[in-house]
Amino acid sequence: MFLLSLTYFIKDSNMTDSILPKNLWLKILIGMVIGILVALYVPISDTLKPWVSLPGDLFIALLKMVIVPLVLSSVILGIASAGSLNALKSMGARLIPYFILTTAVAITIGIGITSFVEPGLAIDKSIMAPAEKITTQTLLDMSIPDRIMNTIPVNPVEAQLSKNMLQLVILGIIVGISLLTIKRKTTKTFRDICEFTQDLCLMVVSWAMWLAPIAVASLMVKAIGTMGMSALSSMALYMACVVGGLLCILVFYMIVVWVVAKRNPLIFLSDIRNAQMIAFSTSSSMATMPVSLSVAEERLKTSDDVHGFVIPLGATINMDGTALYQATVAIFLCQIFGIDLSLGETILLLITTIGASIGTPGLPGVGLIVLATILSSIGVPAEGIGLILGVDRLLDMCRTTINVTGDLTATVVMERWMHGK
């Protein structure tokens, strides 16, 4: 199937400069609907399940294959394209506070909606799944100084092999800044290598996109088969709080796009729909990042220095959807366990969630691991995570879509602030 898709792409590659197939969003939507119908009405044996999930797994594997070289080359070229250290300082001084502000807004929305609706009071505790032991403790056991030290790529090769995205972004920033301070004549060859690497990675992404509709159908069958309809119905009010909060963030983004970036929100949503569809189906900001870069360049028409810097950094530290989800779960579990948070504890929850969301790997399911840190800060038993496991996959798909939308929103905002367009 991949070879057939590749052959078709090569035949059609001279017809368009875009690396994405035409009407990709519509094809993905059709694949999503087919996947849902198959999951609900077609019985699939245990023998066939690995084969059904194979296209989706191959699709995600292809995207993950190019993440490391694409992150490095994009960050390096994005910073080097700034032209000067002063321009880079100007962008960074605006971007980081912007990320913190939008994350704080997302958390406040999550806390507000969950506190008002109180979904935890309507839950039948008998549906609680067995507590799942969180075995990935490296991040949770680190002190704040250790976390800061963990951002420094002491061994760049190890950072690439372990796919530590925050370290890779820091490495790219250091190399990019170095290129700005070295004479351009001596850096031309290295810049050309980075450009070739970026183009090569995006070409692989374009081939993968021809698999996207089939892959999305496969991923939807797998997701619904994992969750089960009983878990969905019993957690409906909790899920409504999370999805409602995510929609509120989306509205907030559209206001920002309209007021700050001076763009039409409806046109903006139309331009980024391919990235949103991929984010929803893969539940991975990192897997979606190559598509986000393509969308920013081809559809949003942002500058290389802006999207090359904002999107890789945003995919690493800007997780508004995840932050809202984590705050919502914390309040939800407090209601279930009868824990009343004071104003000070609520503020602590906000600060802890902002810190925990920074550097959360943009991969499926990682939010559950980071969530344990937040729960411990307010005295909620980590075993409560077992209650939300059944529906986490669907909510992961939704919050990842908002994470990616937030990165693209930040891109057009920075484009407006840096270049006035």
Image (tube, rainbow, N blue to C red):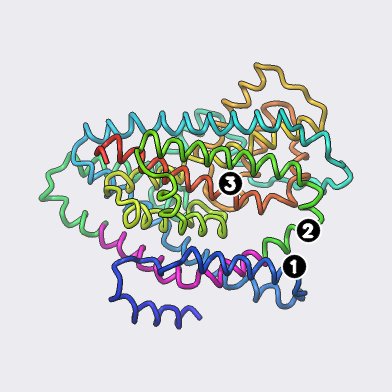
Amino acid found under the numbered disc labelled 1? Leu
What residue sits 51% from the left and 45% below the top?
403
Q: Is residue 88 above or below residue 39?
A: above
Query: Dots 1 and 3: beta carbons under 8 Å?
Result: no
The picture quadrant where one finds residue 339 is top right
Does the magenta-highlighted stretch encompass residue 217?
A: yes
- What segment carries the magenta color? 195-221
Q: Is residue 126 above or below residue 8?
A: above
Q: Residue furthest left?
A: 185
The nearer-to-camera label among 1 and 3 is 1
Q: Nearer the viewer, residue 120 or 47?
A: 120
Q: Earlier in the sequence, mark 1 or mark 3?
A: 1
Q: Which mark is residue 332?
A: none
Disc 1 designates what residue?
Answer: 40
Amino acid found under the numbered disc labelled 2? Met
Query: What whole-number distance in Å separates the C-alpha atoms at marks 3 and 2?
Result: 20 Å
Query: What whole-number distance in Å separates the C-alpha atoms at marks 1 and 3?
Result: 23 Å
Q: Nearer the viewer, residue 346 or 168?
A: 346
